[in-house]
């Protein structure tokens, strides 16, 4: 018995020695989300950032991009978007005179000191918002377009939802700190892109460095100087816009747009510690993007011929491309090797609806499809009836 016990103890000691001598295996720690996002990218000190290419909407860099944060006056990008929507739809004109309410004039923070009863044109109000980040002008325009700031804010949130801005809730139209007023860096990039793509005339406003406006009130007439809050307008040669913001809760934010070699980028910075860091981070992102990106755009795709229609009131149908094709490369590929291939119906049968897909133009790079553009019917063709055929027959005899 003692002999057996001695043997067992010896085996235990032997196994213990063997396992002690084996190398220790440590489970590799899963890299953090920020480490994944920032791998190979520039150093950005701000907690949230996004770099997006405008024409394609491609996100080139992101850091904590989906966390909602107070946006300060970057909010005004959505305010400007709704103003330009109203202009585009003919609901307001640039020459309209906007009267300032007591509520609008009472706004604190950045302002142009509009007085109750004072009037300014829509054009001037846009300058005040774009250049001087005027909170009073924002509320005046909100009330002019929708009757109240509350209704205007409701439409801001509705517009945001339509753009897929899933981490956004607007409480006011100017960005003053308020409970629940927040947006993510990714969503700022989305609304910035929409404003730049749909209304490029915004550049005419947000690139103004200094300009005077005239106050005309019961006290008389006076000049007031606007100075752009976006220092990149003067400090970064490729700048095209767009909007800064800063409050106690939001710290320092910016949505900076810039263009170089036909590539336009948006750099969003949120919650930077100071103004200098905000612009430094934005420039670092923009330089990174311009060094990495090359854009292919097919502005003159293959010509589309009319397509025969069987059994329709018309024998031939015209067609069109849904959009132009853009491709953003960040790998250094040879874009001259991109090839396109058109596939389209040889004949259609009526009825055909305007906007109906009837083909596509696909693009390939080194044997891999990189995108396609739909070909659509540019008109509707109804199915021919007895009298339509009779008219055609008469036409043949007259010919």
Image (cartoon, rainbow, N blue to C red):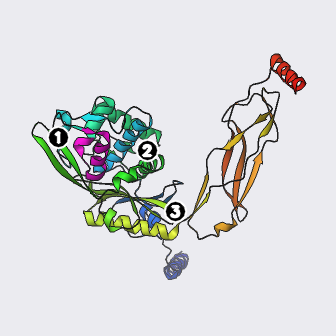
Q: Residues in magenta? A: 120-137
Q: Is residue 394 above or below residue 285?
A: above
Q: Which residue is mark 2?
A: 165
Q: Earlier along the polypeptide chain: callout 2 or callout 3?
A: 2
Which element is circle 2 on? loop
Which image quarter is the N terminus in? Answer: bottom right
User: In x, y percent, where is residue 389?
Assistant: 84, 21
> Which is nearer the eye, 54 or 383?
383
When the figure is inspected, residue 26 is found, relative to residue 92, above or below; the finding is below
Which residue is nearer to you in this view: 161 or 112? 112
Magenta stretch: dominant secondary structure: helix
Determine the image quadrant of residue 228. Answer: bottom left
Image coordinates of residue 185 in percent, x first then y, are 39, 53
Q: Is residue 224 magenta?
A: no
Q: Earlier in the sequence, mark 2 or mark 1?
A: 2
Check disc 3 and report the residue beneath it. Answer: 262
Helix, strand or loop for disc 1: strand
Q: Position of residue 160 (x, y in %)?
A: 42, 41
Give the CA separation, mark 3 to mark 1.
43 Å
Q: Which residue is mark 1?
A: 216
Compute the Cα span from label 2 to label 1. 40 Å
Give the vertical position of 364 relative to 43 (above or below): above
What is the secondary structure assignment of the residue under circle 3? Answer: loop
Closer to the eye: label 2 or 3: 3
Q: Quadrant of the C terminus?
A: top right
Residue 85: image quadrant is: top left
Please tell me which residue is depicted at 34% across the width and 42% down the height of the picture. Answer: 79
Asked whether residue 133 is drawn in magenta, I would say yes
């Amino acid at each position: 018995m003692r002999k057996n016990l001695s043997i067992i103890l010896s085996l235990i000691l032997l196994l213990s020695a063997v396992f002690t001598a084996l190398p220790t295996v440590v489970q590799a720690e899963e890299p953090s989300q920020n480490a994944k996002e920032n791998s190979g990218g520039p150093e950005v000190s701000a907690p949230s950032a996004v770099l997006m290419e405008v024409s394609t909407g491609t996100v080139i860099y992101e850091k904590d991009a989906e966390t909602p944060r107070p946006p300060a006056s970057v909010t005004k990008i959505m305010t400007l978007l709704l103003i330009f929507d109203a202009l585009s739809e003919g609901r307001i004109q640039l020459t309209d005179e906007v009267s300032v309410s007591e509520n609008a004039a009472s706004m604190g923070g950045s302002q142009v000191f509009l007085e109750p009863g004072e009037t300014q044109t829509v054009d001037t109000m846009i300058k005040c918002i774009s250049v001087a980040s005027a909170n009073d002008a924002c509320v005046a325009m909100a009330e002019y377009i929708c009757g109240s700031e509350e209704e205007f804010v409701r439409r801001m949130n509705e517009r945001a939802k339509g753009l897929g801005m899933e981490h956004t809730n607007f409480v006011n139209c100017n960005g003053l700190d308020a409970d629940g007023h927040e947006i993510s860096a990714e969503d700022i990039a989305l609304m910035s892109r929409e404003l730049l793509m749909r209304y490029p005339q915004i550049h005419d406003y947000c690139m103004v460095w200094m300009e005077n406006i005239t106050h005309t009130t019961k006290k008389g007439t006076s000049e007031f100087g606007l100075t752009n809050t976006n220092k990149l307008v003067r400090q970064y040669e490729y700048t095209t816009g767009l909007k800064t913001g800063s409050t106690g809760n939001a710290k320092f934010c910016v949505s900076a747009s810039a263009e170089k070699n036909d590539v336009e980028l948006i750099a969003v910075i949120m919650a930077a510690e100071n103004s200098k860091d905000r612009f430094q981070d934005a420039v670092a992102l923009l330089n990174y993007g311009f060094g990495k990106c090359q854009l292919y755009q097919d502005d003159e795709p293959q010509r589309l011929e009319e397509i025969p229609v069987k059994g329709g009131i018309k024998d031939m149908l015209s067609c069109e491309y849904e959009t132009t094709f853009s491709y953003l490369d960040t790998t250094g590929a040879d874009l001259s090797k991109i090839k396109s291939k058109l596939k389209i119906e040889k004949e259609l049968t009526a009825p055909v609806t305007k906007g109906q897909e009837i083909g596509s133009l696909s693009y390939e790079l080194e044997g891999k499809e990189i995108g396609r553009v739909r070909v659509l019917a540019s008109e509707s063709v109804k199915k021919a009836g007895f009298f339509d055929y009779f008219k055609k027959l008469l036409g043949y005899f007259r010919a």
